[in-house]
């Protein structure tokens, strides 16, 4: 066989192999594409979020962490990281892992009160030691070798110390006193004559006001403060901030009983019913049960839900829903109009807590309204009555056990009903 034919056969073989390789690649390459992160299982996604949190804790690059979390295509990154944190805590993950998740959740907007348990406690700075003053120099004793000369009366008088020649007194180092505990208003706050909304308003605090704490009530949810005019009043703990250590604040003595509700005098034949002093009253306040909030009981173990909603319904004097009524979230400063979430309904997302009152009727007229208070997500500030009615516990002891465990912190929901009085 000629050499020319051998080379021709070799070239044809190489070209044929190259074309077969291209065909095989076109058939099998699409099957080797990398899977999407959003297709991972729930457990794999939790591990991925934990790795992102550890990376953020090491580098501090928040934008990179957000970009990595967005690959999971979750609708709410804050709730995603908070949920992973709660599951990691139940699984007994390391404190460093929990602290990294809590730090990332806080940066994404999660309430700080729900994360304090997981974040590391700052190391206090050492207390400086006061500088010792040098000892006062003393006159050395006369040498025993030299005989003492007899001084004249004039020399004795000149040698006596005068008032201006005394040694400088030793400086006294005093400890800096602890700051007086204060309440700080984050918005306009009513100051009442006693620990409850049934007491009359005796003053007010504007945003940023600081007043000294004098005492507390037995339950520890109201502070007695002293106003600039020396008047004593009370503010609700859930709607103010605290500055200083309140550990030694005493329980107030002789707290007056709330004033009785005045009974209007009956008239013989009224021509028209008198207009009530309040246009809207709080008809009901209810804490959601565990199942309603997305959780459940597994025997005696409580599994917390993820919800933290504040839902309001406004009805007329006959109990019929009213659309178009404006309700204000007092501490979030967010207004909602009823009818947006169903007949007579409106809704907020709760942070640490809020209060509600009606501000405008369906015709846009400003109204006077009672206030719904205590709508919080911190179990330490939820009453036994609310917990028991919602089915979280059965008596004072089991309710206190929930608070001691900080159960479901940041994940409680409430219903409020306002009724128009005319």
Image (tube, rainbow, N blue to C red):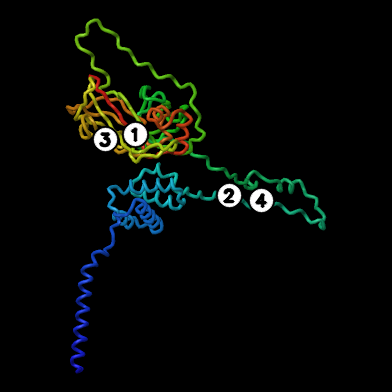
CB under 8 Å between callouts 2 and 1? no
Mark 3 element type: strand
CB under 8 Å between callouts 3 and 4? no
Badge 1: residue crowd in 10 Å (few <14, some 14–19, many ≥20): few
**Disc number lying in front (2 or 4):** 2
**Disc number lying in front (1 or 4):** 1
- Residue at point 51%, 50% (across, down): 125
Q: Name the residue under label 1.
A: 206
Task: Give the camera-side residue of 205 and 307.
Answer: 307
Q: Is residue 3 visible?
A: yes
Relative image position of residue 92 (x, y in whole percent): 46, 48
Tell which circle, 1 or 3, labels the residue nearer the N-terminal end.
1
Toward the bottom, the furthest residue is 2
Mark 4 element type: loop
Q: Give the vertical position of 21 relative to 317 (above or below).
A: below
Relative image position of residue 167 (x, y in whole percent): 64, 47
Toward the front, the furthest residue is 1
Tell which circle, 1 or 4, labels the residue nearer the N-terminal end.
4
**Disc number lying in front (2 or 1):** 1
Task: Give the camera-side residue of 49 and 15.
Answer: 15
Mark number displayed over residue 130 = 2
Q: In which quarter of the image is the N terminus?
A: bottom left
Task: Give the camera-side residue of 139 and 75.
Answer: 75
Mark number displayed over residue 136 = 4
Q: Name the residue under label 3.
A: 347
Q: Distance between the residues labelled 3 and 4?
A: 75 Å
Badge 3: residue crowd in 10 Å (few <14, some 14–19, many ≥20): many
Horizontally, is 401 left or right of 41 in the view?
A: right
């Amino acid at each position: 066989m000629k050499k020319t034919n051998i080379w021709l056969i070799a070239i044809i073989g190489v070209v044929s192999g190259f074309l077969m390789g291209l065909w095989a690649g076109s058939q099998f390459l699409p099957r080797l594409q990398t899977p999407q992160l959003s297709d991972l299982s729930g457990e794999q996604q939790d591990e991925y979020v934990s790795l992102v949190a550890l990376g953020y804790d090491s580098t501090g690059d928040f934008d990179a962490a957000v970009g990595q979390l967005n690959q999971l295509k979750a609708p709410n990154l804050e709730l995603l990281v908070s949920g992973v944190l709660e599951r990691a805590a139940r699984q007994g993950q390391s404190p460093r892992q929990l602290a990294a998740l809590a730090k990332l959740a806080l940066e994404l907007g999660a309430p700080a009160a729900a994360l304090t348990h997981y974040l590391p406690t700052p190391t206090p700075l050492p207390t400086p030691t006061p500088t010792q003053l040098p000892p006062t120099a003393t006159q050395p004793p006369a040498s025993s070798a030299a005989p003492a000369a007899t001084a004249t009366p004039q020399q004795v008088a000149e040698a006596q110390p005068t008032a201006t020649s005394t040694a400088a007194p030793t400086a006294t180092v005093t400890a800096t006193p602890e700051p007086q505990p204060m309440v700080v208003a984050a918005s306009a706050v009513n100051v009442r004559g006693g620990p409850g909304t049934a007491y009359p308003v005796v003053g007010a605090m504007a945003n940023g006001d600081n007043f000294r704490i004098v005492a507390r009530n037995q339950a520890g949810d109201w502070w007695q403060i002293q106003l600039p005019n020396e008047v004593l009043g009370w503010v609700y703990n859930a709607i103010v901030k605290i500055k200083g250590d309140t550990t030694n604040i005493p329980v107030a003595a002789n707290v007056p009983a709330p004033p009785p509700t005045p009974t209007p005098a009956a008239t013989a034949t009224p021509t028209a019913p008198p207009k009530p002093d309040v246009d809207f009253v709080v008809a009901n306040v209810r804490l959601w049960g565990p199942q309603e909030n997305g959780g459940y009981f597994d025997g005696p173990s409580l599994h917390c839900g993820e919800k933290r909603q504040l839902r309001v319904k406004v009805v007329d004097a006959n109990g019929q829903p009213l659309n178009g009524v404006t309700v204000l979230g007092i501490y979030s400063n967010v207004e909602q109009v009823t009818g947006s979430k169903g007949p007579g309904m409106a809704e907020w997302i709760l942070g640490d807590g809020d209060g509600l009152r009606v501000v405008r009727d369906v015709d846009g007229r400003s109204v006077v309204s009672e206030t719904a208070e205590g709508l919080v997500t911190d179990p330490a500030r939820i009453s036994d009555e609310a917990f028991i009615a919602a089915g979280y516990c059965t008596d004072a002891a089991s309710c206190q056990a929930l608070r001691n465990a900080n159960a479901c912190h940041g994940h409680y929901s409430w219903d409020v009903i306002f009724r128009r009085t005319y």
